[in-house]
Amino acid sequence: MAIKTPKEIVRILNEYIIGQDEAKKSVAIALYNRYRRMQLSKQMQREITPKNLLMAGPTGVGKTEIARRLADIVEAPFVKVEATKFTEVGYVGRDVESMVRDLVSEAVRMEEKDQFARVKPQATKEANKQLVRLLAPGVKRENRENQMQQMQDMMSMLMGGGNNQNNNDQEEVTDEVRNQRMDVAEKLNKGLLEDREVTIEVEQAPKANPMSDMMGQMGMDMGSMLNDIMPKKKVKRTLPVKEAREVLIQEESRKMVDYDTIYQRAIERTQNNGIIFIDEIDKIIAGNKRNSGEVSREGVQRDILPIVEGSTVNTKYGPVSTDHILFIAAGAFAESKPSDLIPELQGRFPIRVELNALTKEDFVKILKDPQNSLLKQYVALMKADGIKLVFTQEAVDKIAEIAFDVNQGTDNIGARRLSTILEKLLEDVLYEGPDMEMGEITITEAYVEDKLGDIIMNKDLTKFIL
């Protein structure tokens, strides 16, 4: 886990998320406490459990973004799930343990990426060797000799010895070919053949198998077991050298890494650093009148409880303990309150944070300040057409005012309202952009009022358009 102090975490969050200082401070402390825990004795580590967070606030104010950015900051496995997707004991829906299996899969992907980066120099060297052989092929052996060699390879795999033969074993390399390959290798190193097409053979991607997914939920990976004993099916692809090299690097990397080690490290990474964000947790709160559907909602809470409390979940990579996974739950709680959750689940989210509704000033900052702000995104999109898009400060203030007013008058969807308004505002610019010859377009307050004024005035249209 990348180590950052609470202040450093908050500073980074401020680059992407406007306001919500209390929430940022709370998640930063919870995250740094993980590092503190890892410095203690093994016995004390087992005793200290994560201080899970419950965030309450309107939609679109930054709950999900805080959790996602948090995981990026510390390079931790992260998954976001909606509580409404779960049903009691998995009936006509996902069972709650699937969130842990998804988290382990994400950790495996991250660990595999790290290991691939470690072996990339050697994998690149092997990939370039293959490209040289493909661009300057040798003379193929007689068919009978090839067939005998293939039979020997098949027998070797069935006996557990693997296939150690390579293309060199099935071709004859003459002096002329050898000289040609030296020339190709030199050109490859100089980057002179990057756009030349080459046909490569790659392993066919495994097809999705619902039965395999079901076995994975039971902790069995039948697909991997079958892949280990069955010969890999190859397919031919014709690609430019620069793309073919990346495909070959991936294949060579898989041969060089130890997947047993990757799976073990991924499990450890999940158990110590994993973050699960449970959204819409307020939607599984039963109302005052308990009908069968609402009883089922409470059943989902009771299914989630042991996962959050700490239990062992079987996955296709091995058993995973949830004792030290950090859970962040969130909900709007418009028609309920956190205290309506079952008491046992409430106790597992000791840190409560309330996020505030966004003001007009918040909208102005959201439009301009973050690294990935909406205005910067649209400016970059129009730059692709050779057009410089400029927003005056008055226009930005007007857009923010409209977003705030529409949220007040209709459903409050937070910062997401800005995306809807900007898309409507810039509709003509985005449509005409590729055919425009002017070098600069300035969005003024008058333009904003002209494009959006009628819609804002007509409250009936507002709810459907904005």
Image (cartoon, rainbow, N blue to C red):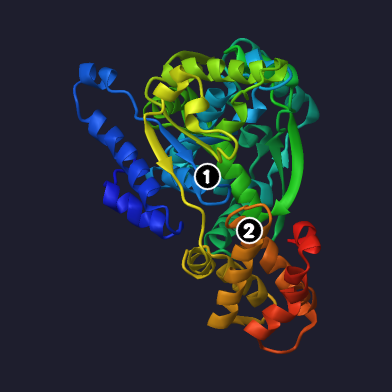
Q: Quadrant of the N terminus?
A: top left
Of labels 1 and 2, the one closer to you: 2
Foreground residue, 186 or 434?
Answer: 434
User: Which residue shows up at 62% across the image and 36% down it?
Assistant: 168
Q: Residue at x 40, y 54 (%)?
A: 13
Q: Quadrant of residue 451?
A: bottom right
Query: Which comes before the other along the chain, label 1 or label 2?
Result: 1
Q: Position of residue 36 (x, y in %)?
A: 23, 34
Q: Amino acid at mark 2?
A: Asn
- Circle 1/circle 2 CB separation < 8 Å: no
Residue 104, percent across and down? Answer: 51, 27
Mark 2 neighbour class, 10 Å CA radius: few under 14, some 14 to 19, many 20 or more: many
Relative to 149, is 425 above or below? below
Residue marked by disc 1: 64
Instruction: Judge from the rendering whether residue 447 lies leftward or rightward of residue 317; answer left or right.
Output: right
The secondary structure type at the circle numbered 1 is helix
